[in-house]
């Protein structure tokens, strides 16, 4: 994958998560929604997989560029939006 001309290596799960967030750009997605649609399993309340993979994506994409795409909506979930 390329971001602003730079190669960014993503795992399959990171890529799937980013694609799902981009398909729903501007819509706040709950952790439960992301688990059901990206990981394809029911939310059990005990996993932090979404938070971990969001952190991975931010390290590979957001932290390297001035414009941040992935935003946290506290207590709700995550959204991709232009700043």
Image (tube, grey):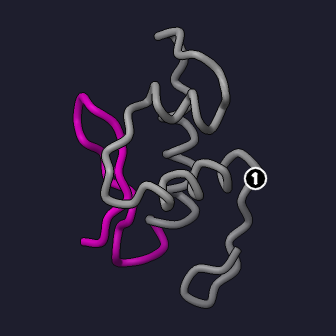
Q: Is residue 13 magenta?
A: no
As drawn, is 18 to the left or to the right of 77? Answer: right
Q: Nearer the viewer, residue 48 or 80?
A: 80
Residue picked out by circle 1: 11
Characterize the local packing of mark 1: few (<14), some (14-19) or many (20 or more) Cα atoms within 10 angstroms. few
Residue at image coords 45%, 65%: 63
Report x, y in % for residue 39: 66, 32
Residue at image coords 59%, 58%: 19
As drawn, is 16 to the left or to the right of 23? Answer: right
Magenta range:
63-83
User: Which of the 4 image quarters holds residue 40?
Assistant: top right
Report x, y in % for residue 46: 51, 10
Report x, y in % for residue 32: 46, 25
As drawn, is 27 to the left or to the right of 34? Answer: left
Q: Is residue 3 above or below residue 58?
A: below
Where does the C terminus fall, quadrant-wise?
A: bottom left
Where does the N terminus fall, quadrant-wise?
A: bottom right
Report x, y in % for residue 50: 52, 34
Q: Nearer the viewer, residue 62 or 31?
A: 31
Q: Nearer the viewer, residue 69 or 34?
A: 34
Residue at image coords 39%, 57%: 70
């Amino acid at each position: 994958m390329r971001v602003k001309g730079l190669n960014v290596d993503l795992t399959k799960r990171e890529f799937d998560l980013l694609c799902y967030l981009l398909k729903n750009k501007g819509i706040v997605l709950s952790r439960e929604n992301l688990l059901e649609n990206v990981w394809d399993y029911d939310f059990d309340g005990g996993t932090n997989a979404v938070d971990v993979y969001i952190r991975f994506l931010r390290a590979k994409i957001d932290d390297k560029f001035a414009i941040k795409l992935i935003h946290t909506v506290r207590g709700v979930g995550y959204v991709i939006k232009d700043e």
